[in-house]
Amino acid sequence: MEMVKTTLFVLALTASSAWGKDFSLTIGNPVAVALPDGVVKKKDAGMAVRVENCADVANAQVTATAEGIVNGARRSVAVRLVAATTPGAFAVSHDWPLEGAWVVHLTGHCGASTASAVVPFGPNGFIRESSKFFPRAATAAEVEAVLKTLSGGAQ
Amino acid sequence: MIQDEKPPLVKAPDAIWRSIEAALDATPERRPTNLCAAWQWAAASLVVVGAISWFAFKPAAPAWQVSRLEGSAAVDKIKVGEWLQTDSNSRARITVGDIGVVDVEPNTRIRLVAASPTEHRLTLARGEISATVSAPPRLFLVDTPASTAVDLGCAYKIKTDESGDGVLRVTSGWVSLEWKGRESLVPAGANCRTRPGTGPGTPYFEDASEALQQALAAFDFAKGGDESLRILLSQARVRDTLSLWHVLSRVEPRDRVRVVDRMVELVPLPAGVSREKALQLDPATLKSWREELAWKW
């Protein structure tokens, strides 16, 4: 009985430790993820994303849209996420046009927790240094602010 | 006048019946011989007809389509074993089966080596090509004088000069540069130099400092020694762990600790990666570490 109590205590401690950190999103080079059918789709991937500090990582969800300005016109494009072999990791498909200025708005859910990221893209791929991460859903104004900075305030 | 008059019936001599019966008895013994000969003739005829048909309709050697992008195009296809050469004013596009395209830049000499379902292989003798391929890993390969570029699902440019020196620039996905057991993994946004006799150098991101790039060149190809390693370690950013991860396996054993310490300083050692095993260059440990570091690249 004492052993069961000890085990439960350790498990509770471990769980509280995991929950103690904020749920968040991490972005990376597409080569960071292995896709179920090999790496063939990596050519089309703009980047990779994974959830962090999620107790139920198998059921974590991430959605993405590309927000851009093309020839002065504001555009929004749905972005496909390809689940990687590692639960909670995804390849972000480069589904937006090459012309114009674009940011990718990622939103992740883990149980009741939400986190988001706004990632600008340049000619050579995503720009980590200019990316913004939030421990909640990003507001429309926050997405527009990153896009405005990327496009040089041309919006 | 024709008369309908029947001739008188006459009995045949016994000798005739005997000769007929003898002939009938002998016939079954000769039949198999004739039949066998007929089959032999038929089989021989089939072989001859088959051979003629094969020569007449044999499948053409695998070939890829070639189209002109700029200048003049002397050919519209390239077959296995053939060379394609562009002059200073010409560019061409090779359609690589149904998996992608290769753009051939001016002053380039390239040969189609294999075009089978399991291997699509070119040799780049000199010049520059841009490849965009969507295929299973290791299906598309380009040999150069200093290494083989193995496609792992990617788009890239590779060039090589008259002396065999070359450089690879990956624009999406990643490429493995291989030569005699030495391997460099080059992800999108990174470059890698190659030299005959040495093979692929250490990959580096295009936005790495000029000092780091020069130190890598000295380390890889000019026996830069301790000074180049010192510059490398001091110049490396988080993203340059790509280069340091490769350098770890290429330094003298006594220098591995310096490299690991700098890498851990830039990115904490992830869970499940043992420092001791990394110093021993344990392949599984190095692979796990690389996969985790890639999130910072």
Image (cartoon, helix red, strand yellow):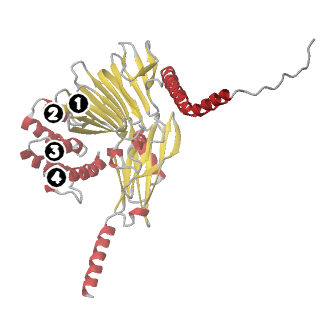
Residue occupying image coordinates x 43% and y 38%: A153
Residue holding disc 3: B248
In the shown orientation, is residue B117 left or right of residue B283? right
Q: Earlier in the sequence, mark 2 or mark 4?
A: 2
Pointer 3 with pointer 4, Cβ within 8 A:
yes
Same chain, marks 3 and 4? yes
Q: Chain of mark 1?
A: B
In the rendered image, is residue A29 in sight?
A: no
Q: Which mark is residue B220?
A: 2
How far apart marks 3 and 4 lie (CA) works out to 9 Å
Q: Earlier in the sequence, mark 1 or mark 4?
A: 1
Residue holding disc 1: B193
How far apart marks 3 and 2 lie (CA) works out to 13 Å
Q: Residue furthest bottom?
A: A1
| Among the 4 quarters of the image, the one containing residue B142 | top left
Q: Earlier in the sequence, mark 3 or mark 2?
A: 2
Q: Amino acid at mark 4?
A: Ala
Q: Amino acid at mark 3?
A: Leu
Q: Secondary structure at mark 2?
A: helix
Q: Amino acid at mark 1?
A: Arg
Relative to B126, is B33 above or below? below
Pointer 3 with pointer 2, Cβ within 8 A:
no
Relative to B264, is A110 above or below? below
Q: Earlier in the sequence, mark 3 or mark 4?
A: 3
How far apart marks 1 and 2 lie (CA) works out to 9 Å
Q: Earlier in the sequence, mark 3 or mark 1?
A: 1
Q: Secondary structure at mark 1?
A: strand
Q: Which mark is residue B165?
A: none
Same chain, marks 1 and 4? yes
Q: Which mark is residue B278?
A: 4
In the shown orientation, is residue A33 left or right of residue A98? left
Q: Chain of mark 4?
A: B
